[in-house]
Image (tube, grey):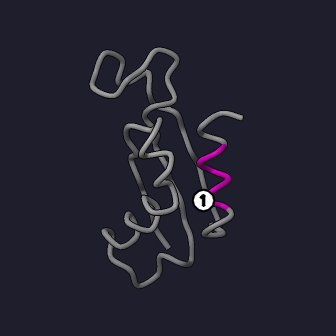
């Protein structure tokens, strides 16, 4: 299972989004901080979930970061999040 698949699965299980797309964009950061050979370090997440309704952008980002804390502490260097309800 790729890291993108693992991220999508964790977010799906925790937040039950209506839409979710996770893309590995590591190739766009080759040679930059946190990048490693083979990728799977930088990700873009686009997600629509009812749980985000009425929450600020910071609150939504904190929810996702909390769910992915293990990945962020180990192999994932960066997440670009586009979240909506």
Q: Position of residue 63 (x, y in %)?
A: 44, 68
Q: Which residue is farthest right?
A: 1
Q: Position of residue 78 (x, y in %)?
A: 37, 41
**Residue 63 lies within the magenta run:** no
- The quadrant in which residue 54 appears is bottom left
Drawn side of residue 85 relative to residue 4, left or right: left
- Residue drawn at x 33%, y 69% as measured from the top left: 57
- The mark tally for this picture is 1
In which quadrant will I find the N terminus? top right
Residue 22 versus residue 48 in the image, above or below: above
The residue stretch that appears in magenta: 6-12
Q: Position of residue 11 (x, y in %)?
A: 60, 59
Nearer the observer, 77 or 15: 77
- Residue drawn at x 47%, y 81% as measured from the top left: 53
The residue pinned by badge 1 equals: 11
Nearer the observer, 77 or 54: 77
- The quadrant in which residue 5 appears is top right
Drawn side of residue 65 relative to residue 17, left or right: left
Q: Which residue is farthest bottom?
A: 54
- Residue drawn at x 44%, y 27% as measured from the top left: 26
Q: Position of residue 65 (x, y in %)?
A: 42, 58
- Residue drawn at x 54%, y 38% as measured from the top left: 23
Nearer the observer, 37 or 26: 37
In the structure shown, which secondary structural element does the residue marked by tag 1 occupy? helix
Q: Main secondary structure of the magenta part?
A: helix
Determine crowd level at label 1: few under 14, some 14-19, many 20+ residues with C-alpha closer than 10 A: many
């Amino acid at each position: 299972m790729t890291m993108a698949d693992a991220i999508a699965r964790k977010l799906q299980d925790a937040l039950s989004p209506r839409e979710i797309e996770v893309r590995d964009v590591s190739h766009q950061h080759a040679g930059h901080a946190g990048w490693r050979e083979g990728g799977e370090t930088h990700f873009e997440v686009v997600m629509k979930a009812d749980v985000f309704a009425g929450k600020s952008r910071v609150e939504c980002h904190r929810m996702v970061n909390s769910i992915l804390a293990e990945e962020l502490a180990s192999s994932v260097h960066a997440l670009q999040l586009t979240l909506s309800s």
